[in-house]
Image (tube, grey):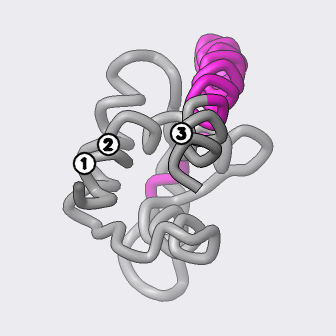
Amino acid sequence: MKQTQLLKGVLEGCVLLIVLDNEVYGYEMIQLLKENGFTEITAGTVYPLLQKLEKQGFLSSVLKYSPDGPNRKYYHTTEKGKMHCQEFIRQWNILDKNVNHLIDLKGEEHG
């Protein structure tokens, strides 16, 4: 299984975690994801996801001047987004516990 297939379901939560206490523009988000181990992430994945999260009301954005070129769209988390992020953390912790339990169990059987 390719990592990208597995990643699609959790990328939304990871993006919200990165934006949680920051204001981030698109290219910066790509770089932050890469710095945190998501090395295969592309702009073609991140920009549509940011738009989707904004449309769902989890992120909001503001255009700001950039001395390096066109204005940048900065995203920040809404209250709804913060609540969604907390739910992601809760669900991830349950999933992590369950998957690790199965891995430990099968590792013992086949080790």
Mark before the other along the chain sequence, 1 or 3: 1
Which SS class for mark 3? Answer: helix
Tag 1 near tag 3, CB within 8 Å: no
The disc labelled 1 sits on which kind of residue? Answer: Gln
Q: Position of residue 86 (x, y in %)?
A: 72, 19
Occupied quadrant, residue 19: top right
Residue marked by disc 3: 106
Q: Residues within 10 Å of mark 1 (few under 14, many from 20)?
A: few
Residue marked by disc 1: 5
Magenta region, mostly helix, strand or loop? helix
Q: Is residue 22 left or right of residue 46?
A: right
The quarter of the rendered structure image containing the N terminus is bottom left
**For the point 66% across and 19% down, which residue is it?**
94
The disc labelled 2 sits on which kind of residue? Answer: Lys
Q: Position of residue 110 (x, y in %)?
A: 51, 50
Instruction: Please tell me whether mark 2 or mark 3 is closer to you in this view.
Output: 3
Please report the bounds of the magenta region as a residue range.
73-101
Which SS class for mark 2? Answer: helix
Residue marked by disc 2: 8
Q: Is residue 105 left or right of residue 61?
A: right
Tag 2 near tag 3, CB within 8 Å: no
